[in-house]
Image (cartoon, rainbow, N blue to C red):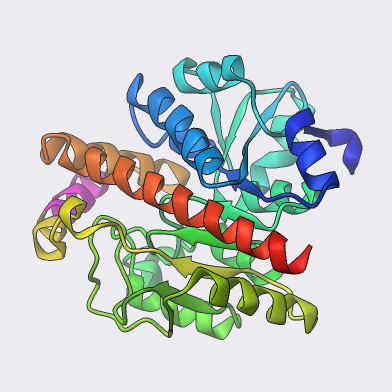
């Protein structure tokens, strides 16, 4: 397995010394936002992790290997290249065997983080059960990966373009704890509110670290979803965002966009139709998640290394 894994020396040293490391995905760089904001955001997010005590490990696939930790040059490449694959689990063997460049989704990033021994992972929002999934059967591999891979996922909730209620039901069925930081309502990515109560609430990072320790020490495999609402002054009100989501979904249906192309299309459409407001919120939430993820990595390594 490790012949396919390339760990950046800084990340390798931190892991060997039991120091805090936080994994970061690359899909948000290649497919989540436009250049040059994507590169600036990727660099800023790594810096936020460092400033809060953790070593960042941005994860991607390159030249036939899974990379845990990228150089500045590699970040620049993934931000600007046009031919980068969006890689989920099903795509990994193909992209690796063909030595293609691949930006990893939540599911693929979790798997590679787990291979490297990284326990805390920061993303923007997770995938889930798509709206109209009763017709399309479109359920993100992020959810099935969370069932089996023991990595904590810090996100701003479930992407609001999805069916949040059904996704929460699915997570419950699979035994994946869902905890919201500091509020009773589950957040919905761009917004602090979703209309759904959070299954669990914890207000303190050390409490979350203790919960991770308890879960994995008991042999309960799988992820914990840590929902971290973005700050109130940076959110887009849920009702306002829903109007844009409905228009984006209609546009995707008209253009017959399916599969893994759906999410990037919807995010780009919403960004264009909110005059970039959604992009600003997206950047704000990933930075906020990086801070909390780094704090969690520090707390987890301190108590449970």
Numbered label tally: 0
Identify which residue is drawn at 19% across, 60% down.
232
Predominant SS along the magenta part: helix
User: Where 59 sits versus 98, above or below?
Assistant: below
Q: Quadrant of the N terminus?
A: top right
Identify which residue is drawn at 83% across, 47% down.
17
Residue 90, position in %: x, y? 66, 48
- Residue 149 visible in the snapshot: no
User: Where 274 sits versus 285, above or below?
Assistant: above
The residue lying toward the viewer, choosing from 258 and 102, is: 102
Identify which residue is drawn at 66% across, 62% down.
151
- What's the magenta region? 244-255
Left or right of 51 in this view: 70: right
Q: Is residue 250 magenta?
A: yes
Residue 237, position in %: x, y? 13, 60
Residue 112, position in %: x, y? 72, 46
The residue lying toward the viewer, choosing from 28 and 232, is: 232
Residue 76, position in %: x, y? 51, 17
User: Where 27 sits versus 123, above or below?
Assistant: above
Q: Is residue 87 magenta?
A: no
Q: Quadrant of the C terminus?
A: bottom right
Image quadrant where residue 187 sits: bottom left
Left or right of 108 in this view: 98: right
- Residue 277 visible in the snapshot: yes
């Amino acid at each position: 397995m490790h012949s396919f894994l390339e760990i950046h020396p800084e990340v390798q040293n931190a892991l060997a010394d039991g120091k805090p490391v936080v994994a970061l995905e690359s899909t948000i760089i290649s497919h989540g936002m436009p250049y040059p904001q994507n590169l600036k955001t990727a660099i800023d997010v790594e810096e936020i992790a460092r400033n809060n005590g953790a070593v960042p490990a941005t994860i991607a696939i390159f030249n036939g290997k899974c990379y845990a930790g990228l150089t500045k040059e590699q970040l620049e490449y993934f931000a600007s290249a046009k031919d980068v694959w969006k890689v989920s689990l099903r795509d990994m063997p193909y992209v690796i065997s063909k030595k293609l460049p691949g930006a990893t989704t939540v599911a693929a990033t979790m798997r590679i983080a787990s291979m490297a021994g990284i326990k805390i992972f920061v993303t923007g929002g997770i995938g889930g059960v798509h709206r109209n999934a009763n017709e399309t059967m479109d359920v993100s591999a992020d959810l099935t990966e969370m069932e089996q891979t023991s990595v904590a996922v810090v996100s701003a909730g479930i992407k609001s373009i999805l069916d949040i209620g059904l996704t929460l039901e699915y997570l419950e069925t699979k035994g994946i704890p869902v905890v919201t930081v500091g509020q009773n309502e589950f957040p919905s990515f761009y917004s602090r509110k979703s209309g759904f109560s959070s299954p669990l609430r914890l207000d303190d990072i050390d409490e979350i670290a203790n919960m991770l320790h308890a879960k994995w020490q008991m042999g309960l495999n799988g992820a914990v979803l840590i929902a971290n609402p973005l700050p109130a002054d940076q959110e887009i009100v849920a009702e306002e965002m829903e109007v844009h989501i409905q228009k984006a979904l209609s546009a995707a249906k008209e253009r017959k966009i399916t599969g893994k192309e759906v999410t990037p299309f919807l995010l780009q459409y919403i960004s264009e139709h909110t005059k970039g407001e959604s992009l600003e919120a997206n950047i704000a939430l990933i930075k906020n998640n990086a801070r909390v993820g780094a704090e969690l990595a520090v707390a987890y390594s301190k108590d449970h290394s």
